[in-house]
Image (spheres, coloured by chain):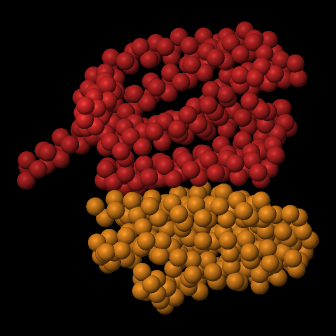
Chain colours: A red, B orange
Amino acid sequence: MSETHRTKQARDRWNWFWEWANPVKFMSLSGKALPWVAAICALTLIPGLVWGFFFTPAAENFGSSVKIIYVHVPTAMMAINIWVMMLVASLIWIVRRHHVSALAAKAAALIGVTMTLAALITGAVWGEPMWGTYWAWDPRLTSFLILFLFYLGYMALWGAIDNPDTAADLTAVLCIVGSAFALLSRYAVNFWNQGLHQGASLSMDQQENVSDVYWQPLVLTLVGTSALFVLLLLIRTRTEVRKRRTHALETRERMADV
Amino acid sequence: MIALLLRDMRLGVRSGGGFGLGLAFFLIVIVLVPFGVGPDSEILARIAPGILWVGALLACLLSLDRIFQLDYEDGTLDLLATAPIPMEGAVAVKALAHWLVTGLPLTLSAPIFATLLNLESPGHIWVFLSLLIGTPALSMIGAFGAALTVGLKRGGLLLSLLVLPLYIPTLIFGAEAATRGAAGLENATPLALMAGITAGSIALLPFAASAAIRVNLR
């Protein structure tokens, strides 16, 4: 068996995945998936939040302020995961030139920046009763603020360039370089100041974990927020694809007029 | 490539308001700080390394859009792209020229301006050393940002929004190295980490920057 034949076979095995890159296929698949994702989101996020807000005991030393954890932790988790997703989408765009991938990265940025802002604000609201301050230059807080700035720069670059392909290329390059520097900042900030923030609360290490009463609804909200992201991402990407199509139609009409 | 370096340096020094402006801006920032925080020499001496670093960083930012913008407008960049030298080399040389015209004068003048902020004597050498190691990274990262925004009509503000977050790690390690040095503490770790950032930027960012320029020239 020759080398080229084998790689072709390997490519065939992943075809089901790359089919998504075809805008027509993506539109039909995502259209079918949309109600299911919405259902998963509604079935996990709403019960999770209700359970967390109304049916968990107020914690010792924390009072009922502990309940903000059900917004703070999922949004903070998504803020980082969405940037990673954008990085992967940017790499796919650079390597394989699939337009849906670039559009998905563009669509994810606004959701990501919202999640980052939500995590920062809920953190500030929570920090006031707990640490006695809305803001401290703690490593985690600082690195989230830096992540927020990276999102802003990324979105500003998308907004500034008219040609969609140029914009997709340049933002992808920025996303890759930015990821390296965001990671560097994360460790630089750690080095710069020791913080107030607690360590990991959801690690596998049971010593540090929050107790089960809080943990169970938190898992629900985590799943729910992830589903919410996928839902919003699909909707926004579909809008972007439609926008592209409208633009193409308009251009064609203008050409016909001339 | 040496010809390109000399040409860029000559343009940087002679074209109106590029060369002296950065230094003058740096001086003004340093002068403004005591007006803002008060003339207490103890406070000034304590924050001096950080102020010098932030000032140098902002002064460096001022002249970034000059790296590629004029060459893009008059077509020199197209010629460089088709020239027999690799684009990555041209980008690195242009960043080096930017450093020689901007970063090096800032580094040399920083110990002198530090006197205005009542910095004690071991501090001068550390501010100088940390800037000497750190400013090449600022020029290289800036060249990458300039490459991203070269095709835009009014890219100046966007350029700062893109570049300043990328400057954060260099600033943290640089200011930390200078502050610790001035306080007589051990500062080999931040200095080494900053040198690592500089070396990494010089090694990798020319590739990213020239990829961005190729996209912009398309």
Which quarter of the figure has residue B48? bottom right
In the displayed structure image, the side of residue A180 where residue B30 appears, left or right: right
Name the residue rendered at 45%, 84% in the picture.
Answer: B2
Q: Is residue B7 above or below residue A238?
A: below
In the displayed structure image, the side of residue A57 where residue A158 appears, left or right: left
Q: Is residue A232 above or below residue A214?
A: below
| Residue A257 seen in this snapshot | yes
Q: Is residue B217 above or below residue A252?
A: below
Residue A130 image position (x, y, % from top left): 84, 32
Tag count in the figure? 0
Q: Nearer the viewer, residue A95 or A60?
A: A95
Name the residue rendered at 58%, 60% in the picture.
Answer: B200
Q: Is residue A138 above or below residue A20?
A: below
In the displayed structure image, the side of residue A236 where residue A198 appears, left or right: right
Query: Which quadrant is the N terminus of chain A positioned in?
Result: top left
Residue A17 image position (x, y, % from top left): 34, 27
Q: Nearer the viewer, residue B187 or A155?
A: B187
Residue B67 image position (x, y, % from top left): 46, 74
Q: Residue furthest front?
A: A1
| Residue B36 seen in this snapshot | no
Residue A5 image position (x, y, % from top left): 24, 33
Name the residue rendered at 40%, 32% in the picture.
Answer: A236
Which quarter of the figure has residue A217? top right
Name the residue rendered at 34%, 62% in the picture.
Answer: B214
